[in-house]
Image (cartoon, rainbow, N blue to C red):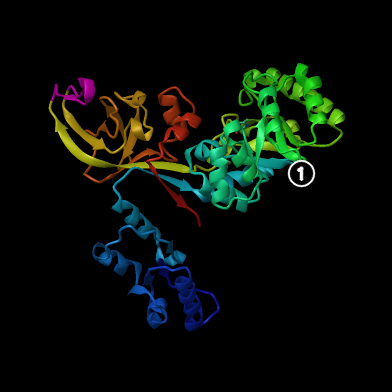
């Protein structure tokens, strides 16, 4: 642990640091780096390996001799100690491609959508696909802390992982496979039931004595992907009424074009069909359930369709293609990599596989540590993609390789180990998506698992 003096606690140094020392030994922390005159003055209180510095600057100059390796480091400091310099130093030790996730920005975006809800409307957060590439437990834990009502994952495995790391919120599983039913019961995961096959299989699986297992019914109102349809209602109702094993917690549908004004009439049609379906279901079942149809864009575009709950996905990560102006949202993810080598290229030389990259006048290139296996798609190659090298835009040159690619950095002052921005708040994921004709969802979820995620939270 790297810890600074703590100010304005209203307690004496001895009292405060004795308590911290007790916590450190209780949590079996192996090493303490204390920074500041106060913590240093009570060094005898700490019964573990310690090293103390008067200031952050002293720590930074001693850094090369401190040999951090194979350690999990908690960095905690009062504002004025400027510990962001330390986290920067520590992350730079791994000259690697990293994705920084700003948890405060996620909390901000969540709050924004919460303010857009009518009173009493619940919020389900979509954390499928590794929370849109941003990490599962870290995001789910934050959402749990900020009191969202439900989490949704795509597969049971994702839900099990969340339960194992201590998430207690209700979790819906969108693709519940029969092979995972047992685990779903064990970990209290709630299936989305979208067809008679899956409905009957789940009923058959549940033990005779099971009563009211919470389930969610998916209704197809126009997406033409998954879900029960209007003509299925009589049989669906019969099955639900004949079994006492299930309790419909919610019925929901998914909009195919909520972000686009072009599809407004169609969207209103979907909402109308959903409402009618839920009305019959409610009357026949004789009990209330939660109705939900809004994804991110629909929350603000179709506030009358918020019903009892909304499903927030990409908005959490700072994108909403239904909003002409997204200044209410904050950027959550930054992807950074580093320069591994800089080279001079003579006129007529070719760069990379297939020899597609050419600088007719010659120039300078930088090889950077990100490739298609990290999720930087091959379609970014040959000048289509752009990164920021020391703040300056630099286009790709030649083909994107598996673990690296090359940038044309002619005229830019650049050295080995310099930081390269793949995306951030300036060069956005929306820009990248536009470069290769895709959507932010795909850019985000493509970032592969080998790219380290680093979380910030203040
Ligand atoms: C992914 C998903 C959402 C969230 O959509 P966003 O556009 O990311 O808000 C909502 N509902 C369902 C069924 C989904 O699969």
Q: Is residue 322 visible?
A: yes
Residue 246: x and y in percent read 75, 36
Element under disc 1: loop
Q: Residue furthest front?
A: 208
Magenta highlight range: 347-360
**Viewed as shown, does residue 29 lie left or right of 195?**
left
**Viewed as shown, does residue 169 lie left or right of 242?**
left
Which one is in front, 304 or 199?
199
Q: Quadrant of residue 264?
A: top right
Q: Quadrant of residue 277?
A: top right
Instruction: Please give the name of the residue rendered at 19% of the width and 38% of the height, measured from the top-left corner.
Output: 342
Q: Quick check: 13 above or below 373? A: below
Residue 59: x and y in percent read 31, 67
Which one is in front, 295 or 48?
48
In the rendered image, the quadrant that contains the N terminus is bottom left
Q: Residue furthest top?
A: 231
Q: Is residue 140 visible?
A: no
Which one is in front, 265 or 441?
441
Find out whether residue 359 is within the magenta segment. Answer: yes
Find out whether residue 95 is within the magenta segment. Answer: no
Instruction: Please give the name of the residue rendered at 37% of the width and 78% of the height, measured from the top-left corner.
Output: 40
Q: Which residue corresponds to mark 1?
A: 119
Q: Residues within 10 Å of mark 1 (few under 14, many from 20)?
A: few
């Amino acid at each position: 642990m790297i810890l600074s003096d703590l100010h304005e606690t209203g307690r004496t140094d001895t009292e405060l640091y004795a308590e911290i020392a007790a916590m450190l030994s209780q949590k079996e922390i192996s090493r303490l780096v204390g920074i500041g005159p106060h913590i240093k003055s009570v060094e005898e209180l700490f019964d573990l390996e310690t090293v103390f510095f008067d200031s952050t600057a002293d720590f930074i100059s001693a850094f090369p001799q401190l040999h951090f390796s194979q350690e999990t480091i908690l960095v905690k400091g009062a504002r004025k100690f400027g510990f962001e310099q330390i986290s920067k130093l520590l992350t730079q030790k791994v000259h690697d491609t990293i994705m920084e996730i700003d948890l405060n920005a996620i909390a901000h975006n969540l709050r924004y959508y919460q303010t857009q809800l009518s009173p009493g409307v619940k919020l389900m957060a979509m954390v499928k696909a590794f929370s849109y590439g941003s990490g599962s437990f870290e995001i789910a834990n934050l959402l749990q802390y900020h009191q969202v009502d439900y989490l949704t994952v795509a597969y049971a495995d994702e839900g099990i992982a969340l339960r194992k790391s201590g998430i207690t919120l209700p979790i819906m599983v969108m693709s519940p496979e029969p092979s995972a039913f047992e685990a779903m019961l064990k970990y209290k995961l709630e299936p989305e039931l979208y067809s008679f096959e899956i409905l009957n299989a789940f009923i058959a699986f549940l033990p005779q004595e099971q009563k009211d297992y919470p389930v969610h019914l998916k209704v197809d109102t126009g997406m033409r992907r998954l879900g029960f349809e209007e003509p299925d209602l009589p049989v669906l109702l019969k099955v639900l009424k004949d079994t006492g094993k299930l309790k419909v917690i919610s019925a929901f549908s998914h909009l195919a074009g909520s972000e686009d004004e072009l599809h407004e009439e169609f969207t209103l049609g979907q909402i109308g069909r959903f409402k009618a379906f839920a009305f019959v279901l409610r009357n026949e079942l004789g009990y209330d359930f939660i109705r939900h149809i809004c994804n991110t864009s629909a929350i603000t575009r179709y506030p009358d369709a918020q019903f009892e709950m909304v499903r927030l996905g990409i908005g959490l990560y700072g994108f909403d293609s239904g909003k002409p102006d997204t200044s209410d949202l904050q950027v959550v993810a930054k992807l950074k990599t580093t320069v591994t080598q800089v080279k001079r290229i003579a006129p007529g030389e070719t760069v990379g596989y297939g020899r597609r990259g050419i600088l007719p006048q010659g120039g300078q290139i930088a090889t950077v540590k990100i490739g298609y296996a990290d999720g930087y798609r091959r379609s970014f190659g040959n000048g289509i993609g752009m990164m920021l090298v020391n703040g300056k835009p630099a286009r790709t040159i030649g083909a994107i390789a598996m673990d690296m690619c090359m940038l044309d950095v002619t005229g830019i002052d650049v050295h080995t180990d310099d930081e390269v921005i793949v995306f951030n708040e300036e060069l956005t994921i929306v820009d990248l998506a536009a470069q290769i004709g895709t959507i932010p969802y795909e850019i985000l979820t493509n970032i592969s698992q080998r790219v380290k995620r680093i979380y910030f939270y203040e």
